[in-house]
Image (spheres, rainbow, N blue to C red):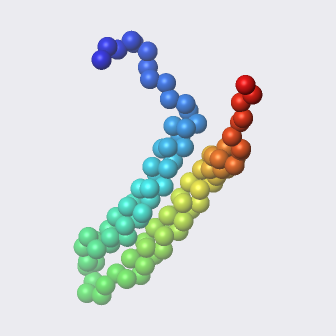
Amino acid sequence: MPQTGQPLFLARRSYRRRRMMDAVRMLPVLGMVLFLLPSLWLPGETPRPDTGRGGLYLFAVWAGLVVLAFGLARGLAPAMEEEERTEELPPQEEDG
């Protein structure tokens, strides 16, 4: 396949929407990794478990995931509304 020297053009709006959808799809995987991360922590130097620190970590991860999902949803809302509007339009009839 010969290259013409011109870069491949991708529409900026659809490219960003696809990357945001990819981020939305990866959010559960990120959450699972972050939730399982405390199981890899070494126990503290005290004989008691560090449940307070682990609980605060899990709450912070949960709150961060909620904020991240909210931000991604707000970023995708205009694109999704535009798609719904184009699907609702009746097909154009050709005069001929």
Extreme-front residue of the structure: 96
In this rendering, the count of numbered labels is 0
Extreme-right residue of the structure: 95
Residue for point 50% across, 43% down? 18
- Percent position of residue 41, x then y: 28, 71
**Of 59 and 52, the residue lying toward us:** 59
- Direction from residue 15 to residue 74 in the image, left or right: right
Residue for point 48% across, 44% down? 19
| Residue 36 can be seen in this image | yes
Extreme-bottom residue of the structure: 48
**Of 3 and 34, the residue lying toward us:** 3
- Percent position of residue 44, x then y: 28, 77
- Percent position of residue 22, x then y: 45, 49
Residue for point 56% across, 32% down? 12
Position of the N terminus, as image quadrant, is top left
Q: Is residue 86 above or below residue 63?
A: above
- Direction from residue 43 to residue 92 in the image, left or right: right
- Direction from residue 50 to residue 56 in the image, left or right: right
The answer to which quarter of the image holds residue 96 is: top right
| Residue 34 can be seen in this image | no
The answer to which quarter of the image holds residue 17 is: top right
Q: Is residue 3 above or below residue 52?
A: above
